[in-house]
């Protein structure tokens, strides 16, 4: 049976809560509890453990145990984990980032997480941090050279095998100006990895927000959804004058932005997607925006009854529907 609007796992990203202390002592553990309870009070039953909130790959056994207890006490389920800005092909820190990724997979399994999302994006530059919206200034750009692509495929394949061993899916997040920065390049990379436990996280918003010419959102969806096993969703209002070379994008509600999520979900279903959807937002009250976007998906976009879905090219977390 396919997932429906009633039981589709929609997770709140912990992105909007900033960086939480990690020692696990009573006072700091209270911050974990407060953040998680706030998410639950916003009507979420699932969370995405974004590692800008806690560096999960650096937690001790005791901190991991305390975190799992706190998650349970808050009445939410950690269904996904997003590890960001630690590229495994970083020229200086790639080996350390790879080791961190392995530790993150182990912690994810211990926390009961079903899918972990990695990317190739780097830490924000000083110039990006000065901007109202960091994407208005270009950051690092991956070299699309054979040796770089081979290294990325090899390291993600290594992580994919580890993920399979601990019962977790691995997802690769689309992100601008990396080897995952276009639909074609992302699909090529996941095909080169060639493990059904490794799929794509089609975070289309990361690509269409750029102040430069971008791929059409529908082209990105159609190309990447057959490989999707996790999905960050966010939207941007975009305006452009290509003749004058002028482009602008700002965060918006899912239903108001450039990306048509009603059509995107139909494409996802036809492509066999049955995975966690994680709502993200930059700026303002990110949690309330995420909750509004969850309600939009659940009440007006996701299927109200079981539907026939296509056959995905990668493994799905909920192949038979959840809680059935």
Image (cartoon, rainbow, N blue to C red):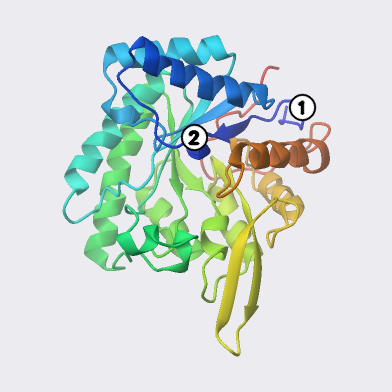
The mark found on residue 308 in the picture is none
Which residue is disc 2 drawn over?
17
> Along the line of sight, which residue is nearer the eye, 313 or 83?
83
Image position of 160 (left or right of 14): left
- Rendered location of residue 12, percent (x, y): 59, 33
- The answer to whether residue 179 is seen in the rendering is no
279 versus 78 height, above or below: below
Q: Residue at x 47, y 13 (%)?
A: 70
Mark 1 sits on what residue? 6
Where is residue 322 shown, x and y percent of the image? 66, 22
Q: Is residue 185 above or below residue 243?
A: above
Report whether 89 appears left or right of 203: left
Residue 21: x %, y % from top left: 35, 26
Q: Nearer the viewer, mark 2 or mark 1?
A: 2
If the image is split into quadrants, where does the C terminus sit?
Answer: top right
Quadrant of residue 101 within the rendered picture: top left
Q: Is residue 185 left or right of residue 237?
A: left
Name the N-terminal-most of marks 2 and 1. Answer: 1
For mark 1, give the secondary structure: loop
Residue drawn at x 76%, y 51% is 262
Residue 103, percent across and down?
27, 28
**Closer-to-camera residue (192/60):** 60
Secondary structure of the residue carrying tag 2 is: helix
Mark 2 and mark 1: Cα distance apart in space: 27 Å
Residue 236 shows in this picture: yes
Left or right of 274 on screen, residue 202: left
Which residue in the rendered view is the most extreme toward the bottom?
A: 243
> Number of marks in the image?
2
């Amino acid at each position: 049976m396919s997932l429906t609007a009633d039981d589709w796992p929609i997770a709140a990203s912990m992105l909007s809560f900033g960086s939480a202390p990690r020692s696990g002592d009573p006072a700091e553990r209270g911050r974990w509890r407060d953040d998680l309870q706030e998410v639950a009070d916003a009507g979420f039953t699932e969370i995405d453990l974004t590692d800008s909130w806690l560096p999960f790959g650096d937690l001790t056994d005791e901190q991991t145990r305390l975190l799992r207890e706190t998650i349970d006490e808050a009445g939410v389920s950690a269904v996904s984990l997003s590890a960001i800005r630690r590229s495994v092909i970083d020229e200086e820190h790639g080996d350390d980032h790879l080791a961190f990724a392995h530790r993150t997979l182990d912690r994810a399994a211990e926390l009961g997480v079903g899918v972990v999302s990695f990317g190739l994006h780097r830490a924000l530059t000083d110039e990006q941090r000065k901007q109202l919206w960091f994407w208005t200034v270009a950051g690092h750009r991956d070299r699309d050279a054979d040796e770089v692509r081979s290294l990325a495929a090899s390291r993600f394949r290594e992580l994919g095998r580890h993920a399979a061993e601990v019962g977790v899916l691995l997802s690769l997040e689309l992100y601008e100006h990396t080897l995952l920065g276009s639909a074609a390049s992302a699909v090529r990379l996941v095909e080169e990895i060639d493990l059904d436990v490794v799929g794509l996280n089609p975070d289309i918003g990361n690509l269409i927000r750029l102040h430069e010419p971008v791929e059409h959102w529908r082209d990105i969806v159609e190309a990447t959804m057959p490989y999707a096993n996790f999905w960050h969703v966010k939207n941007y209002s975009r305006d452009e004058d290509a003749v004058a070379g002028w482009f602008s994008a700002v965060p918006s509600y899912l239903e108001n932005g450039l990306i048509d999520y009603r059509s995107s979900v139909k494409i996802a279903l036809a492509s066999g997607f049955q995975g966690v959807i994680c709502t993200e937002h930059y700026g303002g009250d990110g949690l309330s925006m995420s909750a509004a976007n969850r309600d939009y998906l659940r009440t007006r976009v996701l299927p109200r009854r079981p539907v026939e879905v296509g056959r995905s090219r990668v493994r799905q977390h909920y192949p038979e529907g959840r809680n059935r």
